């Protein structure tokens, strides 16, 4: 009884034991981290989005500048003020046309979101069959485990999901895919 505190509680390794029993090697954390970083770079914010304040100020201040330049070129004659106003108006129309038609894309960067999912939802979530099959096999051995679906989202579009299996302090990556293409998956020996 006095020595009970000296005995450490056994570490939970339910998923690791299941992976070893099934002969499965999960996707390494470094592979997942490198992939997440590469995708963040690939789907990062556009130049226009990163500098939208400066670009907006530049475009708005350019309108009177265009009018002043046109007025100066005309020598500030009585007709030059109408021409200056017209040229400023045309400039604003060009800016509105560029931004309104989507020629200048203000694409925000993508971000990762994680959510819990059930093994029953894997088909509906379009998890590739080999990853879904392996996940269900592991969950049969460790029914208390949970699944986490990580998704790279950009404007409500899912670009690049991955799947984790977790219990307590254990977490392992079982696969990364894009569309139907598997990028990395746990390997069964």
Image (cartoon, rainbow, N blue to C red):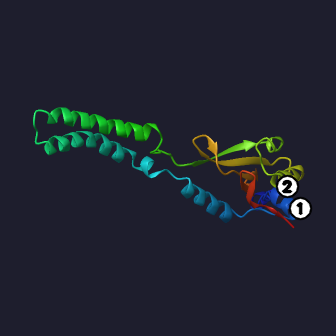
Residue 181 appears at what percent x and percent y?
74, 56
Q: Is residue 171 visible?
A: no
Q: Residue at x 19, y 44 (%)?
A: 69
Q: Position of residue 161 (x, y in %)?
A: 69, 50
* Residue 22, disc: 1
Residue at the spot 56% in from the left edge and 48% down from the top edge:
110
**Quadrant in the rendering for residue 57:** top left
Q: Do the numbered discs 1 and 2 sit on residues whose CB atoms are within 8 Å?
A: yes
22 or 111, which is in the foreground? 111
Which callout, 1 or 2, points to the residue nearer the camera?
A: 2
Q: Is residue 115 left or right of 93 when viewed as pictured?
A: right
| Viewport quadrant of the C terminus | bottom right
Q: Residue at x 79, y 51 (%)?
A: 128
The first of marks 1 and 2 along the sequence is 1
Expressed as whole percent of the image width and height from the top left, the position of residue 143 reads 86, 47
Residue positioned 32% across, 43% down in the render: 59
Distance from disc 1 to disc 2, alpha carbons, whole Å, reads 9 Å
Which numbered circle lies on residue 88?
A: none
Question: Mark 2 = which residue?
Answer: 134
Whether residue 54 is visible: yes
């Amino acid at each position: 009884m006095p020595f009970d505190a000296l005995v450490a509680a056994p570490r939970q390794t339910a998923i690791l034991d299941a992976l070893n029993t099934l002969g499965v090697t999960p996707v390494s954390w470094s592979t997942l981290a490198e992939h997440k970083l590469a995708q963040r770079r690939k789907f990062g914010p556009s130049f226009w989005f990163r500098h939208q304040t400066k670009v907006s100020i530049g475009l708005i201040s350019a309108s009177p500048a265009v009018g002043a330049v046109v007025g100066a070129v005309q020598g500030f004659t009585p007709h030059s003020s109408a021409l200056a106003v017209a040229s400023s108006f045309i400039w604003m129309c060009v800016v509105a046309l560029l931004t309104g038609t989507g020629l200048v894309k203000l694409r925000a960067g993508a971000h990762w979101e994680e959510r819990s999912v059930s093994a029953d939802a894997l088909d509906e979530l379009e998890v590739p069959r080999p990853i879904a099959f392996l996940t269900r096999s592991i969950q049969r051995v460790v029914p208390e485990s949970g699944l986490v679906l990580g998704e790279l989202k950009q404007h409500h579009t899912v670009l690049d999901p991955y799947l984790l299996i977790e219990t307590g302090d254990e977490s392992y990556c079982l696969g990364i895919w894009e569309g139907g293409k598997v990028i990395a998956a746990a390997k069964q020996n």
